[in-house]
Each structure stands twice: as C-alpha cells, then as structure tokens.
Image (cartoon, helix red, strand yellow):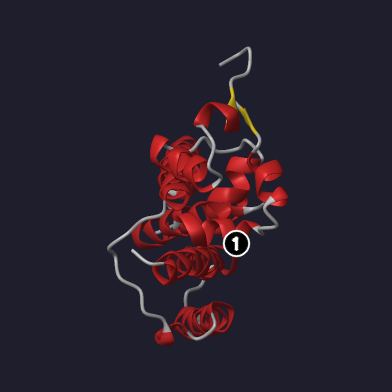
C-alpha cells in the first residue's frame, strides 16, 4: 500500500517529528508509514487524514497486490 | 498519553536494545570463555568487569536514564509491533541455537556445564533481541 503522507507533510512544512507530535505517535511510526514499511491502524490513518483535512482514501492507495 | 511518554518510550526501547546487546556479549563471554580456556577461574573477574562495562555503556548511551520518567501505560503502535516481532525473532533464534546444540551435544557434553549452556542461551536471546530492535528501528 502506497501513501502520500510525505507529500502532504512537506506541503504543510512539517517535519516527521512535528507530525508525530501532532497526532501523538512516535517519529518512527511516521517514518515507517511514509516509506510503506509499516501499515498503520485505522485510528492513526484517520488521525493523519483529519490533521491534513482530507480523506483516508486520498492519503492511502492500494497496490495491485493488496 | 502525552508526547513526553511517547518520546520516553522511543528512547527507552533504543536503550533497551543496546543494553540487550551489551548484556548478550557479556553473557557470551561468560559462557564461551571457560570452554575455550578449559578453566573458569577468571570467570568472576571477567564477568563482573564485562557487566560493569555493559552497564556504564548503557547509562552513557541512554543519557543517564534515572532522570527519565517512564511508565508502562502506553505503547506506541509501531514500537509495539517491532517489540512483538523482536520476541518472535528471539524464539526462532533460540530454537535454532537449541537445535544446533542438540546436534552437537555429544561433543559438547563433557566440556560444558548446564549453567554455561543456560548462559549461552540467554546470551543468544539478548543478542537477537537487541539486533532485531535496532534493525527494525532503522529509518
């Protein structure tokens, strides 16, 4: 599963640590989610989407293999 | 849960990984050294020195942990995941090392005591846990 979190984050001028602090997760969570090494829970996905005022579907894109 | 708790937990896990590595090396020395040298005479001195070395490395690396306020009230999602995976790695590593010892048991039995083998298994578990956490934590 790919995602556009890094793009949204950079557009908002936030560092990974800033975003992690805003949604109360560790920086490693943000780092690994952005690089698609870790698939977050629905709760974290919703928190990120809510922070960027967008939908989960616009942040996360399913691969053909998913 | 606060950002302070999360950062503390993140730091705590990093320290834990390093401490596991140092402790693993310590236990490995304690368990393997007597076998290589056919003696356990310097074991107490060596073990104590290695443990103190590990402990101070842990303290320095961890940034003087007694100042930290850490409570087991919250577990970050990713940190919880890598912790669980690390334990799985530990179990797998333990099984493989026990399998190896089983296959070599006839040649080892006369030279190695049960306490040395127990220490060796603990060393393997510590090393695998530390390496697994550090490997999974990389960006």
Is residue B88 toward the left or the right of residue A58 in the image?
A: left
Asked if residue B114 is positioned above or below residue B25 in the image, the reply reads above
Inspect this view and state whether residue B104 appears: no
Q: Farthest residue toward the top?
A: A64
Of residues A27 and A19, the one drawn nearer to the viewer in this rendering: A19
Inspect this view and state whether residue B116 appears: yes
Of residues B18 and A11, the one drawn nearer to the viewer in this rendering: A11
Which residue is tagged 1? Answer: A17
Question: What is the chain letter for disc 1?
Answer: A
User: Residue A27: image x %, image y %?
Assistant: 56, 57
Is residue B6 toward the left or the right of residue A16 in the image?
A: left
The part of the image, by quadrant, that contains residue A24 is: bottom left
Asked if residue A32 is positioned above or below residue A20 in the image, the reply reads above
User: Residue B112: image x %, image y %?
Assistant: 44, 57
Q: Farthest residue toward the left?
A: B73
* Point 66% across, 40% down: residue: A35
* Point 54% across, 64% down: residue: B21
Of residues B115 and A34, the one drawn nearer to the viewer in this rendering: A34
* Point 45% across, 45% down: residue: A47
Asked if residue B100 is positioned above or below residue A17 in the image, the reply reads above
User: Residue B75: image x %, image y %?
Assistant: 36, 56
* Point 60% across, 45% down: residue: A32
Question: Which quadrant is the N terminus of chain B positioned in?
Answer: bottom left
Asked if residue B135 is positioned above or below residue B98 in the image, the reply reads below
Answer few, some or many: residues within 10 Å of disc 1's Cα (few below 14, many 20 plus, some between 14 and 19).
some
Circle 1 — which element? helix
């Amino acid at each position: 599963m790919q995602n556009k979190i890094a793009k949204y984050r950079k557009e908002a001028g936030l560092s990974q640590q800033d975003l992690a602090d805003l949604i109360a997760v560790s920086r490693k969570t943000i780092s690994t989610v952005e690089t698609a090494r870790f698939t977050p829970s629905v709760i974290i996905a919703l928190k990120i989407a809510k922070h960027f005022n967008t939908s989960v579907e616009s942040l996360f894109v399913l691969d053909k293999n998913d | 849960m606060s950002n302070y708790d999360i950062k503390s937990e993140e730091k705590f896990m990093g320290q834990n990984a390093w401490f596991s590595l140092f402790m693993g090396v310590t236990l490995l020395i304690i368990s393997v050294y007597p076998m290589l040298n056919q003696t356990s005479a310097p074991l107490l001195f060596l073990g104590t020195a290695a443990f103190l070395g590990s402990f101070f490395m842990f303290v320095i690396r961890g940034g003087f942990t007694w100042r930290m306020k850490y409570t087991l009230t919250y577990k970050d999602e990713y940190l919880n995941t890598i912790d669980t995976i690390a334990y799985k790695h530990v179990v797998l590593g333990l099984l493989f090392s026990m399998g190896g010892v089983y296959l070599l048991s006839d040649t080892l039995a006369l030279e190695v005591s049960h306490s040395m083998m127990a220490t060796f298994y603990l060393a393997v578990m510590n090393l695998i846990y530390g390496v697994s956490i550090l490997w999974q934590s990389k960006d």
